[in-house]
Amino acid sequence: MNRNQAIATVAGLLLGLLLVACGQPATPEGASTPAGGSPAVKTRPAWEDDWDRTLAAARKEGTVSVYVSTGGDWVAAIAEVMSKRYGITVETVVARVAELNERIMREQRSRVYHVDVVRDGIVVSETLIPENMLEPLDKALMLPEVIDPKVWWRGGLTYLDEDTKTNFAHQEYVNQGIAFNKDMVKPGEIKSWNDLLDPKWKGKIAISDPTTGGTGQSLSMMVAYKIMGWDYLNRLVKQEPVPSRDNRLMTEWVARGKYPLLIAPPPTAIEFINAGTPIDYAIVAEGTYLTVGGGYLSLLKTSPHPNAARVFINFFLTREGQTIYSRASGYQSSRVDVPTDHLMPSFVRQPGIKYPSALEKEYRLKEAELRDGIVKLFQSLAK
């Protein structure tokens, strides 16, 4: 060993002793040392700590209350995972839009709060947003795969009200506006909206009531706004379509042949089709539009289980959660990584097609005017 090597060895020993004396371990062999001279420390992403804290608090709460206007298999499927994986019980209230609206308002006024999360469209836009009852949902989203803009159809997180960000559009699917009984309507007989104006269909068309919030009103507004225009709707009213607010009843009408045609078929139509009834959807030349339907997710400011609500929302918006939902409901998620092989082809968004959408800003500006016009036009039928 030469003189320089000996000096280096002694210096190394002295440095090691000095570090030990100061309570700092020497750098292990092979460990990386940044420019500052200290070993690299592996840090945990902040969202993981936030998620763990929220999950621990959610398990103590034990329950999340979700109000929906369309229930069925998807609610039970999501609830099963929430219970097994997170130890959280999902309590669900399934009711018609008007009933949900009345229930929520009654709870809010009496200050006896039960609902955490609302999954709906009309209740959110007409009641909860104007009354300032909702928490900004973007503040509740934690999981990276949920907030990643690349996984969503519109290239970002989409809200019904972009100013408040209180209502997340988790689904957006191709709306099929006309259903028919295959035993009573010939294949290809309904190729255009104008075919419904044939005198032979007068009094033989059922319609989801356009005078109240729901599928019929939303479709009629889009038909007036973009697809056919107001003159068409005036002519359609003269065909005396029969309105109903009962989704199952109007679907049964068509399945059993009481009415051969149904405008604005509700979600129950998919259930009837899957059950083998002679119902199908008409593909019309004028095209259709994208709708969110009741697929808006919102968090109440007065949530009695705020942490469990956040866990529910985040899981529901993951690829896994949306896949469970889409397979059970039959509707396409707004996530682009959710499979569509289980969906009816006519409900799936197609690449390269620019669909009119209820999320368009121009449409949103005209929405109130369109709604008032539709209600006025169809009131005589509702009576």
Image: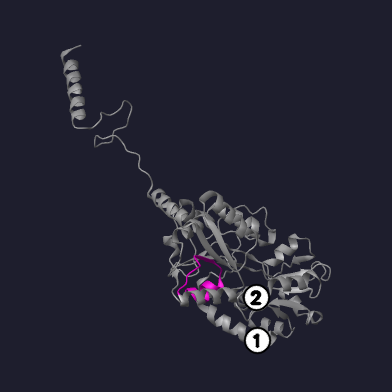
**Which of the two residues, 243 or 23, is positioned nearer the viewer here?**
23
Magenta span includes 121: yes
Give the label on residue 379, or none.
Answer: 1
**Mark 2: few/some/many CA within 10 Å (<14, 14-19, 20+):** many
How many marks the image carries: the answer is 2
One can see residue 33 in this view:
yes
Magenta span includes 330: no
- Left or right of residue 318, residue 279 in this image: right
**Which of the two residues, 94 or 339, is positioned nearer the viewer here?**
94
Give the label on residue 250, or none.
Answer: none
Q: Secondary structure at mark 1?
A: helix
Q: Secondary structure at mark 2?
A: helix
Which quadrant holds residue 288?
Answer: bottom right
Which quadrant holds residue 184?
Answer: bottom right
Mark 2 is on which residue type?
Gly
Give the label on residue 216, or none.
Answer: 2
Mark 1 is on which residue type?
Gln
- Left or right of residue 7, residue 108 in this image: right
**Which of the two residues, 336 or 168, is positioned nearer the viewer here?**
168
- Pick the quarter of the image with the N terminus: top left
Which callout, 2 or 1, points at the residue further toward the start of the chain?
A: 2
User: Residue 227's spot in the image, x, y percent?
Assistant: 64, 74
**Mark 1: few/some/many CA within 10 Å (<14, 14-19, 20+):** few
Q: Residue at x 20, y 21 (%)?
A: 13
Magenta segment range? 111-129
Q: Residue at x 55, y 67 (%)?
A: 67
Which quadrant holds residue 258?
Answer: bottom right
User: Residue 124's spot in the image, x, y percent?
Assistant: 52, 72
Way the structure is coloured = one colour
Q: 344 above or below 229? A: above
